Amino acid sequence: MSGSTARVAKAFAFDRPDRTPLFEIFQPYHPIHWPVCGRNLATDQAMAWDAMSDGVAWEELLDASIRAQFQIARFFGLDMVRLNGVPARNYRRPRKVGPNRWLLDGVPYHVNERTRLVELENPGDRQSDSRRTSEEGLRRAIEQWDGAIPAAGVSAPDPVLAGVRELAAAEGLDWVFMGEIGVGTGVAFFPPFMLMWLLEEPELVRRWQAMQMATGFPRTRDIIAQGCPVIAMGGDVSCDKGPFVSPAVYRDFVLPVIQEHVRLIHAGGARAVYTSDGNHWPIKDMFFFESGIDGYKEVDQAAGMTWPRLIEEGVAGRICIIGNLDARHTLCHATTAEVEAEVIACLRYGQRFPGGHILHASHSVHEDVKPENYIAAVNAYRRYFGLPLLEG
């Protein structure tokens, strides 16, 4: 039996599929969408912000996103699909103040001419990620939490997932949908004061983690029930030089939450994939084996997570590798010939095991990935398996 569902299931079960499954994450508004979907509210961020400043209906934003995400996944022939969300129904409306310039909550944004994405004009502004969380505010929220599931944890059906699933079913595409749920293990995103809490106020961190699980676990169950048999969990725990916290802190604070999340995912009949850039070798046994994960995504070869070492250290024979095309250098800066050579090498490494590999960029098709390089990567994959090449 062939088809995307069987192909992905066999890869996770280390049962050789008819061909290596293909998976990708496309950053919203990346120019790679334009030849496939045209330029519209879902593919051109400046157009989207102009429309939102004019008060475009949420339903129109939703419909455009569903159609664009379906079209791009169908065009590239994906087997496993991870979808992006849309603005909230009562989205905050920017105010246009000039060509490619807007104010949102009084903060100026503009279009980056290189990436064509909308970003803060002043990265150090109060809306920047590093300044959004107040230590006093977060401490107060943790101390006041009564143990109940926060209102934000009450899940509603994902309208993008429902819409894309409907379009795929209508065309007989049995894609495997990946949900993505974090529950507070991505220590790379902890504000600096929380890193100090790990040492000075550990119980405050544990209570914060309980809040994250109270919200994220019900959402995990819901997204599995809505049709996602693969759940990507986590968030970055390492950088190029190794983990952001010591192995001892990782074991005490991060690993137990991952293990509990994995048990929940498995109880729902789904596969658990941990997502993190960086060099995980100092925490290899905990990260790969003690965690109980089924798959590993964002395989960062530029940080040392290379195929030869994944094989040598026994990881590739036990954990499904969802990678390992270099999205830091190769897909951004290499020639198309160099991209094609890396794809072939990656597929050959992956086929050294019966299954156990899903082809994917090491992060995503992000703003620095050249469209022609990703197209070359998929065509190399298609040529390797004797499939018709992409047109255009």
Image (spheres, rainbow, N blue to C red):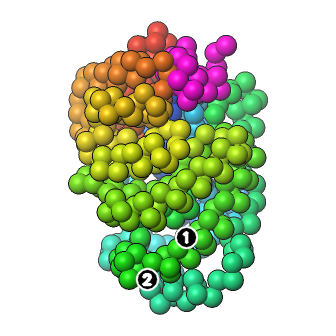
> Considering depth in this image, is 129 or 295 the residue closer to the camera?
295
Residue drawn at x 53%, y 38% as measured from the top left = 294
For marks 2 and 1, give the CA distance: 13 Å
Q: Assess whether residue 2 is covered by the magenta stretch.
A: yes
Which residues are the magenta region?
Answer: 1-21
Which structural element holds mark 2? loop
**Left or right: where does residue 35 sit relative to residue 84?**
left
Mark 1 lies on residue: 209
Disc number lying in front (2 or 1):
2
Q: Is 344 situated above or below 71?
A: above
Q: Residue furthest top?
A: 386
Task: Estimate the x, y position of residue 305 in percent, counting from the top left.
Answer: 30, 40
Q: Is 63 situated above or below 168?
A: below
Q: Assess whether residue 189 is covered by the magenta stretch.
A: no
Count the marks: how many?
Answer: 2
Mark 2 lies on residue: 201
Which structural element holds mark 1? helix
- Quadrant where the image shows the N terminus: top right
Task: Estimate the x, y position of residue 219 in percent, counting from the top left.
Answer: 68, 58
Task: Estimate the x, y position of residue 296 in percent, counting from the top left.
Answer: 45, 41
